[in-house]
Image (tube, rainbow, N blue to C red):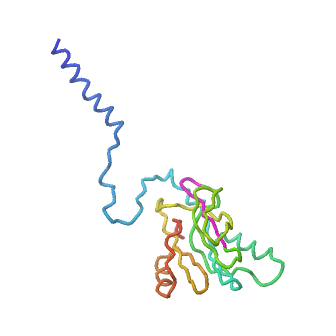
Amino acid sequence: MTRTFNSCIALMIPVLLGIASLATQVLNRAVLPTAGAIGNMSSRSDSTCADPSLAHTVIEAFSGSRLAHFIHFRSVLVNIDSVQAAGPPFWSFQGPVFKAWRTQQPSTVPLFSLVTPTGDDFLFMIGTDAQTPPIVNGFVNNGLVAWVYATAVCGSVPLLSAALASQSDHYWTADADEHADLVARGWADGGTVAFVLPL
């Protein structure tokens, strides 16, 4: 009887270990980043990333009358300039900055525009959902601009902000060298706003 019991246990141990291995995730330590490494630490696959072929280019523009920069899709800026009653264009295009999505995609979060009540300074911040814009003292919601990533995933890069306090102006770039040059010229580092696709 003891021999039969031991034989049954001997047969059951591999089965039990097999079930346990299904329930316990085994880390592949070869893919973990080293301490202090900067980079894409996402375990997301292409199926959980937003489709880059659906991303559109976001343009930086400047208003000389307000001494303010703004980012949005080209068609939005064209429309703003065209629907005004009279006068020169409100926005002067300064060039493409990054790519983002017009509609919500897998793993993306909303990027909101915030503006001062006088309309002479803008901020861009991510929100938790499309109905809840961030709240910043002295700024009001100016609408959802695009869909971006909240962290460095899926080949995204930081969207960096710089602020020129003397003009109450902010500038956004996905080019780290351009950002560093502005900071060297006296602009304050505004940090990372979101993560976006490079051009």
List x then y, in percent, for residue 159. 52, 70
The residue most toward the top is 1
Taking the image as shown, residue 89 lies to the left or right of residue 2, namely right
The residue most toward the right is 85
Q: Residue at x 61, y 85 (%)?
A: 167
Q: Is residue 108 magenta?
A: yes
Residue 112 vertical placement versus 177 (above, below): above
Taking the image as shown, residue 194 lies to the left or right of residue 85, namely left
List x then y, in percent, for residue 82. 78, 75
Q: Residue at x 58, y 66 (%)?
A: 125
Q: Is residue 24 magenta?
A: no
Residue 54 location, quadrant: bottom right
Q: Which quadrant would the C terminus be assigned to in this image?
A: bottom right
Taking the image as shown, residue 22 lies to the left or right of residue 171, namely left
Q: Residue at x 28, y 32 (%)?
A: 17
The residue most toward the left is 3
Residue 123 location, quadrant: bottom right
Q: Residue at x 48, y 59 (%)?
A: 154
The residue most toward the front is 137
Q: How many marks are shown on the rendered structure?
A: 0
Q: Which quadrant would the N terminus be assigned to in this image?
A: top left
* Depth order, front residue of 166/95: 166
* Depth order, front residue of 80/162: 162
Residue 87 vertical placement versus 123 (above, below): below
Q: In terms of secondary structure, what is the magenta stretch mainly?
A: strand
Q: Which residues are magenta?
A: 105-115
Taking the image as shown, residue 140 lies to the left or right of residue 180, namely right
List x then y, in percent, for residue 65. 71, 85
Residue 77 vertical placement versus 19 (above, below): below
